[in-house]
Image (spheres, coloured by chain):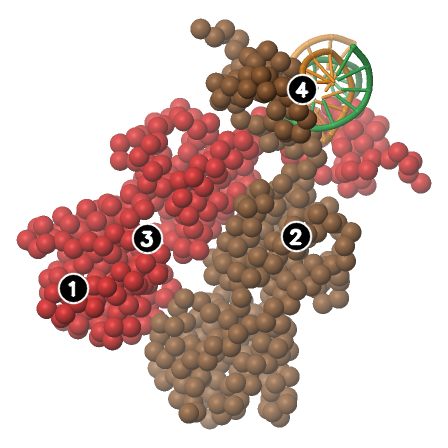
Chain colours: A brown, B red, C orange, D green
DNA sequence: TTGAAAGCGCTACCAA
DNA sequence: TTGGTAGCGCTTTCAA
């Protein structure tokens, strides 16, 4: 019968030490496995641990060791399949490296982002992977946060930070040139207005149109499907003479909205309207015709970001690295007007 | 010029106290805001905090307070839109309640699940929301884990635990009866074999067929799109006489696979094959015809789970509650053979 | 090879 | 209203 004063919470190494008849130091040694402990004692300690059902207190360990093996992932919205895929890749890497992942949705809201980053600071996080808001990229100065920071999907133009990015300008240019080659002349862009990504894709689009001597037409939108649908609907309501003959969306969610608007307007793809955009999400192959997209290597992006972070954690002083990955144009029926 | 012996890490409340000319106790009081502190001192402390850029060390706070405001969410795979939506709802609630969310993917792997739950124990998590594997529901005994546990999507039949579930039997029955009413007579089920959910839906399906005096036909599958596609393809390769005239999938991923197989087989929906399943994912309205589904109230499920957890945290001794939500049948073209 | 003791940063108790 | 002090559970010197 245990005493009434018995430990009410979970057992500590003190309890383990008592039961095994050794000092807490020895218990700790068995745990860290660093220094040698006589097999007899080691055995006794391990048995005591098993009998008591002892489990380490990570908070105590972190306080003492001054390192947390906790990493944060801050994305706009985990429901965006692009970020879902990234988060999954990051979580896999983290699990394999013995790191914990704290997930945060910023909703493109700088205040929420700030609050989450402060939280990561308070947690003394070992590192953070961040898809920064526009405001963040504009204000950010390297070294501001007390943890290594790796950016994904977006990054400040100038500042030297670790980042994993898509070649957005090139990708948008490729999509635009593809539409041009299909004979489209009034290509409108549905651009996410909340990220550098959207802006870079806009730049690539405008450059390609400039080459072709055609005027750009850009709608800056909230980056969600509803905004995409509303924006596209407005464009498609115009008379056939001025109405765009192609819609290009800078994200998977905007593309989804655009497709819905096209269907609601009763326009036949690709004859009356060509459609293309970013992100090879599941649904893009389901309509007839299927949707032309620029596929991003999402897993690769997530994995690379995690790798970059691990490397930076191991070697804090090394020069920042910027990994730029290429997308892949998947031409499908929604934009195929020739051949 | 600070001394060479200056604090190398981040400042502690000791530094703040020194700078403000008060004791650490007073600093702590200003932080917790519990007891009153003279405005002058409070001011001085706050200024010192600002000047030093002090941030709390959550590990220390947790160690001392013996409560962590950390909750875990363990799902099969965050890439499954069903779990994505749930996780987003949970994260929203957690953020609002000042709790941190640690995200874990179990991949339906009991060993990974176990390791994550042990981790949550080591973190001294304030609570965990879990979509348990089949093995877990079979072995689980209430009170085994040192944190409140709320189950989502699945739960042990017998054991009394907090849980948020769909009326799976009823939902599958409704879908099946709908297909029967459309004249389908050879309805095959693509069932996820890794969860109680799949089994309950199978039970509902079988009961409905029994009522109708028809034999069930069940394929137990790994719960992913590829398995769904392969399984469906096998069924659809049979001669028209024995081949199913309807496919019912117990999850969104299996449904996706089934749709792909139907398209690959060149079968016209719904004339040659009726198709229906669970989860109103984005893609289900994109094909022509659109897909009949039983929509789950995913946000509601996530929110309810978080609420249940918060209530349990506030009142550990209250009786376990089981919330059963109803799905909604959305009849679309893929199953409409009459009218 | 082992143990005593200090201390990570913070809060909570008690006394003044 | 304020401060001294103990201690959360663990690791890490330093001595033995």
- Looking at the rendered structure, the secondary structure element under dot 4 is helix
In the rendered image, residues at marks 4 and 1 fall on the same chain: no
Q: Nearer the viewer, residue B195 or A262?
A: B195
Q: Secondary structure at mark 1?
A: loop
- Counting residues from the N terminus, which is met first, the one under dot 3 or under dot 1? 3
Answer yes or no: is residue B16 visible.
yes
The answer to whether mark 2 and mark 1 are in CB contact below 8 A is no
Element on which disc 2 rests: helix
Residue A55 sits above or below residue A160 on the image: above
Q: Which quarter of the picture shows residue A195?
A: bottom right
Residue B129 shows in the view: no
Q: Which residue is mark 2?
A: A309
Q: Residue at x 64, y 88 (%)?
A: A210
Please report, as a chain letter, where disc 3 is located: B
The residue at the point 91 percent across, 36 percent down is B4
Question: Picture coordinates of residue A225 (x, y %)?
Answer: 46, 67
Q: CA distance from mark 3 to mark 4?
A: 48 Å
Mark 1 Cα shell of 10 Å, populated few (<14), some (14-19), many (≥20): many
| Residue B222: assigned label | 3
Q: Nearer the viewer, residue A123 or A16?
A: A16
Q: Residues within 10 Å of mark 4 (few under 14, many from 20)?
A: few
The chain identifier of the residue carrying mark 4 reads A
């Amino acid at each position: 019968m245990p005493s009434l004063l018995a430990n009410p919470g979970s057992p500590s190494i003190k309890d383990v030490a008592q039961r095994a008849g050794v000092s807490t130091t020895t218990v700790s040694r068995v745990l860290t496995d660093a220094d040698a402990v006589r097999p007899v004692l080691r055995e006794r300690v391990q048995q005591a641990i098993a009998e008591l059902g002892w489990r380490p207190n990570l908070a105590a360990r972190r306080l003492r060791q001054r390192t947390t093996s906790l990493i944060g992932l801050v994305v706009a919205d985990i429901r965006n399949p692009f970020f879902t895929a990234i988060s999954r890749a990051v979580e896999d890497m983290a699990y394999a490296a013995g790191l914990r992942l704290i997930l945060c949705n910023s909703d493109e809201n700088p205040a929420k982002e700030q609050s989450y980053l402060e939280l990561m600071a308070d947690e003394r996080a070992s590192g953070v992977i961040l898809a920064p808001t526009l405001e963040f990229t504009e204000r950010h100065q390297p070294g501001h946060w007390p943890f290594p920071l790796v950016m994904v999907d977006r990054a400040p133009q100038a500042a030297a930070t670790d980042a994993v990015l898509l070649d957005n300008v090139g990708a948008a240019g490729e999509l635009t040139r593809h539409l041009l080659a299909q004979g489209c002349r009034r290509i409108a862009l549905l651009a996410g207005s909340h990220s550098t990504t959207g802006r870079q894709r806009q730049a690539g689009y405008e450059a390609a149109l400039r080459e072709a001597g055609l005027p750009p037409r850009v709608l800056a939108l909230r980056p969600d499907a509803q905004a995409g649908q509303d924006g596209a609907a407005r464009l498609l309501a115009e008379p056939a003479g001025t109405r765009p003959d192609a819609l290009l969306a800078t994200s998977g969610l905007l593309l989804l909205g655009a497709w819905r608007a096209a269907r609601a307007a009763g326009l036949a793809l690709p004859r009356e309207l060509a459609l293309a955009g970013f992100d090879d999400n599941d649904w893009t192959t389901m309509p007839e015709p299927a949707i032309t997209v620029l596929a991003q290597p999402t897993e690769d992006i997530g994995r690379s970001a995690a790798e970059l972070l691990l490397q930076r954690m191991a070697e804090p002083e090394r020069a920042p690295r910027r990994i730029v990955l290429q997308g892949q144009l998947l031409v499908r029926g929604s934009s195929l007007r020739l051949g």
